[in-house]
Amino acid sequence: MWRLPSEWWHESWSGLSDGRFVTLGAHPDDSGEYVRELVWLSEGDATVDPVPHVPVEAFADHEPFLVALPHGACAIIAGPSALWVHRDVGSDPVRVPIGGAELLATVAPHPRLQGGCAVSDDSTFAIVLSHGVLTQERRYVADLVIDTERLSATWTSEPRALQPDDFPRDRFGDAAFVDDGEQAVSLTASLRAGGRLTICSEGSDLGSMNRYGSDFFTVATVSPDGAVVERRWEASGWKRQPGKHGIHGRFTVDGEHAILTPNFGTGAWKGHQRVLRLRDGQLLAPQIPRGRSKASILDRSGGRWWIEHEGELLAVDEIALVEV
């Protein structure tokens, strides 16, 4: 169990392959200056590593992007041209240049690292990239290969987007309104498993989600050209319903589930999380242990769930998942 510092801001987090959990965040120190830290948690221990090598900057072009590597290591992608490998608690971080950054220049304006989730069962990660203008509209992924043995990293694909016609776009909830804007959908989380790519799309216009809500949410397996191959779970029609609706999705590091977190308290879920079992597309309601009913699920690794409850991060061995 570990209590978050006052004014802690989660930037990125992930379970690790050895069952631990790591979170990257920033908070003000005693002088009021923001510092960035990497926190490693096991079932009964927490260790904080300072991250001065990725300084906190106001209005930075790129936000640090954390991914889990084999053998309990992790990497902080600081920008298109460099990442830092942290092999373990207290180990010296190793700066690894990223080759192939010119591939990202095929998109104009240049895409940005602006949060998201990327899980992989091999060395290739489909890194989420934003549009580059509206930082909340994450529309692309690009493949990044990280070789932890040779300490090398390379972009191996140009940024690619989803095919908008495969998704239930309804930005304004009015069939008579002609949508003559850019035809695009968001892409906010990725999972590579068995060579297949599964994604979360949180709607057509993330730039106004908090103000206006989204039009749909989809978890789908897609082909290399962004076409939907298999729709795992989808909800839509929200712009034609009362209230605002929206879901934030991310994949568990074990590749077995997607964690779905409502942005609002409207709808049948009333603001409560759901867990999507990927093998059969079954939507499940988590039953958090007594006394922690207001906790949020963050990830699952090593057979245990990692949750946040009233400012504390902790592991839970079992969470019952009930069909809804």
Image (cartoon, rainbow, N blue to C red):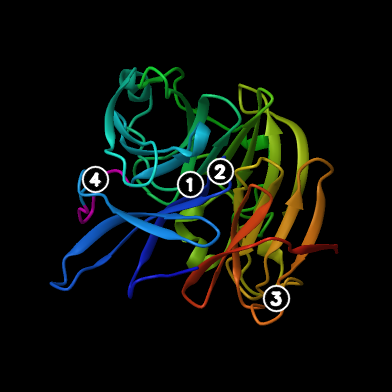
Secondary structure beneath disc 3? loop
Residue 10, percent from left and from top: 40, 60
Q: Residue furthest left?
A: 31
x and y, in percent, of residue 68 in the image: 49, 39
Q: Is there CB contact under 8 Å for labels 2 and 1?
A: yes
Residue at the spot 37% in from the left edge and 41% down from the top edge: 113
Category of crowding for the residue at label 1, using alpha-carbon neighbours closer than 10 angstroms: few (below 14), some (14–19), many (at least 20): many
Residue 208 on image: x %, y % = 47, 60
Is the residue marked by circle 3 packed among few (<14), some (14-19), or many (20+) residues within 10 Å?
Answer: few
The CA distance from mark 3 to mark 1 is: 24 Å
Residue 174, percent from left and from top: 66, 59
- Give the amino acid type for the residue marked by disc 2 in the picture: Ala
The mark nearer the N terminus, 1 or 4, is: 4
For marks 4 and 3, give the one nearer the viewer.
Answer: 4
Label 1, on which residue? 116
User: Could you give the CA–CA distance between mark 2 and mark 1, rounded to whole angstroms?
Assistant: 5 Å
- Circles 2 and 4 in contact, beta carbons < 8 Å: no
Q: Which residue is mark 2?
A: 189
Q: Residue furthest bottom?
A: 291
Query: Is 117 in front, or is 26?
Result: 26
Label 2 neighbourhood size at 10 Å, few (<14), some (14-19), many (20+)?
A: many
The image quadrant of residue 235 is bottom right
**In the rendered image, which residue does mark 3 sit on?**
270
Q: Nearer the viewer, mark 1 or mark 4?
A: 4
Give me the residue at 56% from left, 42% from top: 18
Q: Is residue 34 magenta?
A: no
